[in-house]
Image (cartoon, rainbow, N blue to C red):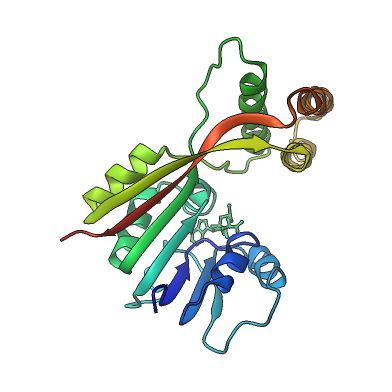
Amino acid sequence: MAWGHVLDAGTGPKSLPWVASLSSQRWTAITAQPSMAESARQSLSSAPRAADRIIIGNWADEELLPGERFDTVLLDYLIGSVDAFAPYFQEALLHRLAARTLGSLYVIGLEPYVPVVADEDVGAFVGDLGRLRDACQLLARDRPYREYPAQWVAAQLQRVGMAVTDTRYFRIRYRKQFLAGQLDICETRARQIPDPALSAALLEHIALMRQRGEALIEQHDGLPYGRDYVIRAVPAG
Ligand SMILES: C[S@@+](CC[C@H](N)C(=O)[O-])C[C@H]1O[C@@H](n2cnc3c(N)ncnc32)[C@H](O)[C@@H]1O
């Protein structure tokens, strides 16, 4: 079977229904978060087969699935989120997952935004929104995500014995749901900031960003900015 035993190495409600739709022998889905395990489970339209597994665990734990190898390994927006669950572990994670790959390994990620987008209102807004979310998380004493470029991921995969066969980019057009989701994270975190004046000032700014974002979405039919990437790699040699 082409997909064989599939590993969804950072599962969630978007990747797991896709993994479950493949004609695989079985699948294993990993998340560091009990809440994500629950939402992934609820996203399935039919009950998993007896051998399919959703496991709560951390790849930093050497005892996670010891010795198991997989025909297909999927890292769906996993690399960018690692800083929140296992800081500084991105390189070791790629090493660990490459060693578990028998067939194809796919990395899906967001190309990091460039810091300054001159004369480009949508790009400047999307970048400011990401920076506001990260600032609110840091000030609430939480760890934000950290995205990595496709080039960096490809270079790391080569270093750990993989051959990169394909890299594709996909342009993004963010919609209202994205704006609302990002600003909800900002609001939740802003309310947790210990300094009440700073918290209030940020909540005011978040309300302005909501107005600005909604106007830009009307004007441009969404927020056309940024790129996602998919990298496929196989064991070299
Ligand atoms: C952005 S989220 C979910 C993306 C997911 N593929 C989806 O369908 O939406 C990243 C996932 O990777 C998991 N994750 C991040 N770092 C991890 C680690 N060190 N060990 C295990 N899971 C990790 C998170 O718990 C979460 O399930």
> Residue at horizontal 41%, vertical 65%?
73
| Residue 233 appears left or right of 133 | left
The mark total stands at 0
Q: Is residue 82 above or below residue 54?
A: above
Q: Position of residue 99 (x, y in %)?
A: 28, 65
Quarter of the figure with residue 49: bottom right
Name, please, the residue furthest toward the top. Answer: 119
Quarter of the figure with residue 36: bottom right
Q: Is residue 68 above or below residue 188?
A: below
Q: Position of residue 48 (x, y in %)?
A: 61, 82
Residue 93 visible? yes
> For this rendering, which residue is in front, 82 or 104?
104
Q: Quadrant of ligand 1?
A: bottom right
Assign the N terminus to one quadrant of the image. bottom left
| Residue 197 appears left or right of 81 | right
Residue 61 visible? no
> Residue at horizontal 52%, vertical 36%?
227
| Residue 77 appears left or right of 120 | left
> Residue at horizontal 76%, vertical 23%?
216
> For this rendering, which residue is in front, 27 or 145?
27
Name, please, the residue furthest toward the bottom. Answer: 50
Q: Is residue 183 above or below residue 103?
A: above
Assign the C terminus to one quadrant of the image. bottom left
Q: Position of residue 84 (x, y in %)?
A: 54, 49
Q: Position of residue 142 (x, y in %)?
A: 62, 43
Q: Is residue 192 above or below residue 118?
A: below
> Residue at horizontal 80%, vertical 38%?
191
